[in-house]
Each structure stands twice: as C-alpha cells, then as structure tokens.
Image (cartoon, helix red, strand yellow):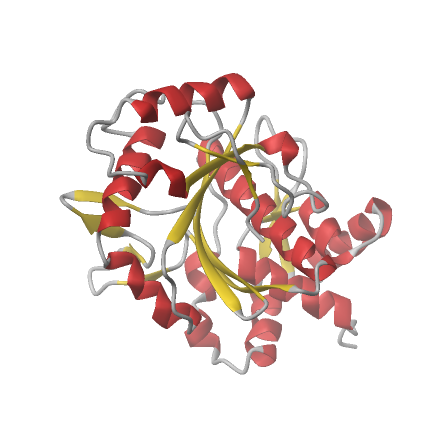
C-alpha cells in the first residue's frame, strides 16, 4: 500500500525543494506549531523515501534535503517534468561545514521575512531569489544567476528580494555576515562586497531585476546582517574611508544585528546606514 501523504507533507517537500537544505527547526518554523510532531513526521518522511537527512560536525540539528519520492511529488505539484526539476543536481550532502552554516543562515533570513509578511497583510514579499540558483553550462558547471560584474568587480549576493506596500515596490540585496572574516580586506569578504555595491549603485546593471519581479525600481537597498555592535561599528568606520564611495552612496547600505531580527521586528526601524554620520534608524517595510 502506498503511503498517504497529507497536504502538510506535500508542503514540506515543496519547502525543502525551494530552500534546498533545511534544519529541523527551520521546517518546524514553516509548518509546525511545536518540535515533537515536526520531528516525528520528518522521521516518517525520511523512512518513506521522501526526504534525506544528514548530520555534520559542530551542528546539533539534522539537515534535510529532497529524496527521489519527494522530488516526484514536487514535480507533480509544480506541474514540471522530473527532468526540468533538476533534482539530481542537489542530491548530495555538503562537505563544507562553513558553506552549510552560511547557507542555513540565508534560509533563516528568508524564512523570517516570509513569516513576517504573512503577519503583515499590507506588506507582500513578491519573490526571493537565493544565491544558489543557477543554470548548468554545457561544460557541466553551474553559472550563478545572481552573479554580476561591474568595473571589473564580480559578486554573487546572498539573496535578492522585493517587497511591495501600498502599490510601491522596493528592491533589496541581502548579505549575511557571520563575523568570521576580516572586514578590512578589499580583495575578499564583506568589504569586497561593499565595494562592489558602491559601484553597482552607480551602474544600471541592477535594473535587470525589474524583469524578474515585474516591477520598476528607482533604487535598491543592501541589507547586511552582522553579529555584534562592535563589528557593525567597525564596518561603518571602514566604509567611511572608502575614497571611491559616491556622494551619499553609503546611505543605501543598511546594517542590523542578527539578534535584532525577529518576525515581530524585521519591519521595525532596526536598520542603520553604514554612513557613520547618519544617526537615523530605518525600516524596510
């Protein structure tokens, strides 16, 4: 007898496909009111071949991704062919612990934003394009969809999304800073990303996202989520010394602390400009 899936089981499979990797607590946030039933159902879906689970050093939670039966269900639900789903590209356990931590941190932000919009009926999340989206080239490599170049600088944002409120739409790029890299090296890490955005803001390249979101944008904001007030202030000091910064360019770079981000607060004035002379607190919605 074939196992009978509930609507929630199907929704879980779709979420795991959308986010690629999800922890137990993340799936619980999206689909369950408490941890115990979430854990029981995830165990069942794993045993039935809809999900796969793995653990990794230094992380207490199990991580889930889609198994073949789950992929077949998702293809049916999305009215896609199994081949177009490209599920086979994602059927693997990541070996890089730091990659996985960063990947799950991006998903944390995306989930928080999704749930916050559900509680704020006047604010709509038009879409969220994650860093991992890409197309396979003829050579077998994956070309990141979000990767862009300007003035010889290349960068792939952690995510791009658009919010709409009262008929007005806004474009956002998000960067998750886990505090493990120096911020003073313009050749890598967060400072390289900031320099990229300062140049990007002056270019017209970012207008490409008007086609993705089917909206017109006058500008964009870069949201940087970091780990501590000390690190935030350090970032502001370093950005102040960028000689290539355009007039008022730093005002579109906004930063907040990870522990300030909650479903109830994400649309509150918790965002600070990286312009250290700007003392205002900003909202994103």
* Residue sitting nearer the eye, 258 or 4: 258
The quarter in which the N terminus is drawn is: bottom right
Residue 21: horizontal and vertical position, in percent?
Answer: 56, 50
Residue 38: horizontal and vertical position, in percent?
Answer: 79, 51
Residue 183: horizontal and vertical position, in percent?
Answer: 35, 22
Is residue 247 among what the camera can see?
yes
Query: Is 239 displayed left or right of 278 in the figure?
Result: left
Quadrant of the image occupied by residue 47: bottom right
Query: Is 143 displayed left or right of 100 in the figure?
Result: left
Residue 220: horizontal and vertical position, in percent?
Answer: 39, 53
State the residue lying farthest toward the bottom. Answer: 79
Is 275 located above or below residue 131 in the figure?
A: above
* Residue sitting nearer the eye, 5 or 212: 212
Quadrant of the image occupied by residue 65: bottom right
Look at 41% across and 59% down and name the residue there.
Answer: 89
Is 149 located above or below residue 87 in the figure?
A: above
Query: Is 210 displayed left or right of 269 in the figure?
Result: left
Look at 34% across and 55% down and name the residue there.
Answer: 146
Look at 42% across and 25% down and name the residue there.
Answer: 276
Look at 65% across and 43% down and name the residue there.
Answer: 268
């Amino acid at each position: 007898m074939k196992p009978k899936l509930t609507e929630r089981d199907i929704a879980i499979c779709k979420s795991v496909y959308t986010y690629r990797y999800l922890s137990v607590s993340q799936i619980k946030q999206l689909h369950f009111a408490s941890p115990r039933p979430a854990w029981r159902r995830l165990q069942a879906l794993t045993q039935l071949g809809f999900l796969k689970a793995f653990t990794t050093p230094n992380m207490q939670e199990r991580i889930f991704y889609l198994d073949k039966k789950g992929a077949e269900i998702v293809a049916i639900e999305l009215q896609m062919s199994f081949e177009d789903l490209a599920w086979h590209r994602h059927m693997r356990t990541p070996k890089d612990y730091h990659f996985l931590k960063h990947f799950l941190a991006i998903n944390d932000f995306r989930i928080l934003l999704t749930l916050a919009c559900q509680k704020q009926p006047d604010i709509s999340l038009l879409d969220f394009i994650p860093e991992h989206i890409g197309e396979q080239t003829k050579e077998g490599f994956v070309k990141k969809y979000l990767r862009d170049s300007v003035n010889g600088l290349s960068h792939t944002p952690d995510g791009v999304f658009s919010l709409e409120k009262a008929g007005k739409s806004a474009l956002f790029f998000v960067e998750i800073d886990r505090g493990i890299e120096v911020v003073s090296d313009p050749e890598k890490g967060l400072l390289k990303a900031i320099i990229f955005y300062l140049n990007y803001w002056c270019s017209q390249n970012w207008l490409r996202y008007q086609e993705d979101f089917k909206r017109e944008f006058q500008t964009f904001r870069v949201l940087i989520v970091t780990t501590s007030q000390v690190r935030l202030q350090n970032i502001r000091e370093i950005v102040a010394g960028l000689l290539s910064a355009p007039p008022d360019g730093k005002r579109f770079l906004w930063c907040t602390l990870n522990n300030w981000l909650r479903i109830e607060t994400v649309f509150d004035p918790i965002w600070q400009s990286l312009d250290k002379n700007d003392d205002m607190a900003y909202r994103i919605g």
